[in-house]
Amino acid sequence: MSEPLIVEKKSGNKNLTKAKKAKNDEFYTLYHDIEKEVNAYIEYNPDVFRGKTIFLPCDDPEWSNFTRFFAQNFERFGLKKLISTSYAKDSKEYKEALHLSLLEVNSPKYDKTKTDSKGKIYTLTRDGSGDGKVDVDDLDWDYLNGDGDFRSEEVKRLRNEADIIITNPPFSLFREFLAWTIDEGKQFLIIGNLNAVTYKEVFPLIKENKIWLGPSIVSGDREFIIPREAVDIVKFTGEIRKNHKGDDIYYQRVVGIRWFTNLDHGRRHQIIPLMTEDDVIKFSTQKPFETYDNYHAIEVSLVKNIPKKYNGVMGVPISFLDKYNPKQFEIIKFRHGNDDKDLRLSNGTCPYFRILIAHKK
């Protein structure tokens, strides 16, 4: 779950402000989006998760598609252990109705007071049901001592136990969550907004090739499921569909979503096909490249127009990172010219956040 950037078509960025205020709001990632992304890493390296402990914080384990996906693929991926945790109902900034999974309501561990005030932890290590396979039916659960906040010492200990951290963290806490993950040297796969690459805490990590974008989302938007109780908070503009039980499910489309990771994948090693500068001008721009007033570089507004074998520096949009191959290009700097102000064209305009790059020699 998460609180990604929601942009309402008729009201601009009003929902961004609401998302930032509703720090504990829940946005559930769809199963097929998780499956598509994770399978790309398996395709590149079939053993990427083998023998590993995977931790899924910021989730409601009994409802999360992250938990369901990795539990169902526990044996296929060769996992050592799966851990997922949730945030306590009473600690959320909206009043959530009580939802109990069959695992919880049928368990002697169930406690109404704890269910409201405590986070929960689900673990999977073995075939507990005795059916000869390890899957979602073998999940074991208990209450946490605290509310499940990822910054708590209790959850930090779970982080320290893990090899790989995978989740959809709160949008407004993305920077803090990323630092929480990287500071311990963990591998990770997390969802955020593309604009996160502009954060001063994030871009240096991209420049230093310590983190990069995942392979499955390169444009457009994605759907998330939101709880009924959160509909008013996010100013819902999506679709309501019935599930197999006839219940209303709220789907909200979210723009600019990306996966952030330090797990290697095949797209990072694909060479971007390019035209020569002359061909770009002839077949695409119909005019020479503009230059910046405050930095010796050309403005390239579309990734497809990056000129092949160009010897100088080029300013490209942040969407370049969707196709960035560190063996093909070098990242020079971000956004600012030699005067430490935004890159500025000769006509005085400043194009939206540019990354300055050069071909690897």
Image (cartoon, grey):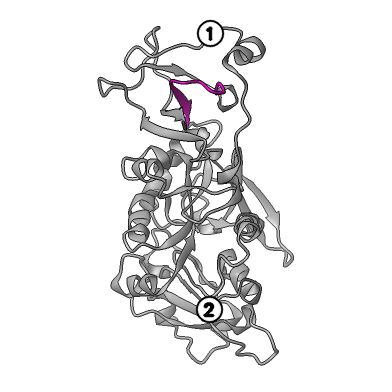
Q: In terms of depth relative to the viewer, which is nearer, 14 or 207?
A: 207
Q: Residue at x 46, y 51 (%)?
A: 3
Q: Would residue 199 be found to the left or right of residue 45 on screen?
A: left
Residue 192: percent from left, percent from top: 47, 48
x 52%, y 33%: residue: 320
Residue 32: say if magenta: no
- Secondary structure at badge 2 equals loop
Residue, x 57% and y 23% (percent of image)? Answer: 308
Q: Which mark is residue 96?
A: none
CA gap between label 1 and label 2 equals: 56 Å
Rendered location of residue 81, percent (x, y): 51, 78
Q: Secondary structure at mark 1?
A: loop
Q: Is residue 113 left or right of residue 79?
A: left
State the residue in front, 150 or 311. Answer: 311
Q: Which residues are magenta?
A: 306-317
Instruction: Give the mark, 1 or 2, whose residue is nearer the N terminus.
Output: 2
Asked if 79 appears above or below 287 in the picture, the reply is: below
Query: Front-most of 96 and 167?
Result: 167
For residue 30, which quarter of the picture?
Answer: bottom right
- Judge whether 284 appears above or below 23 on screen: above
Residue assigned mark 1: 288
Query: Is 63 located above or below residue 176 in the figure?
Result: below
- Can you identify the residue that label 2 sits on? 80
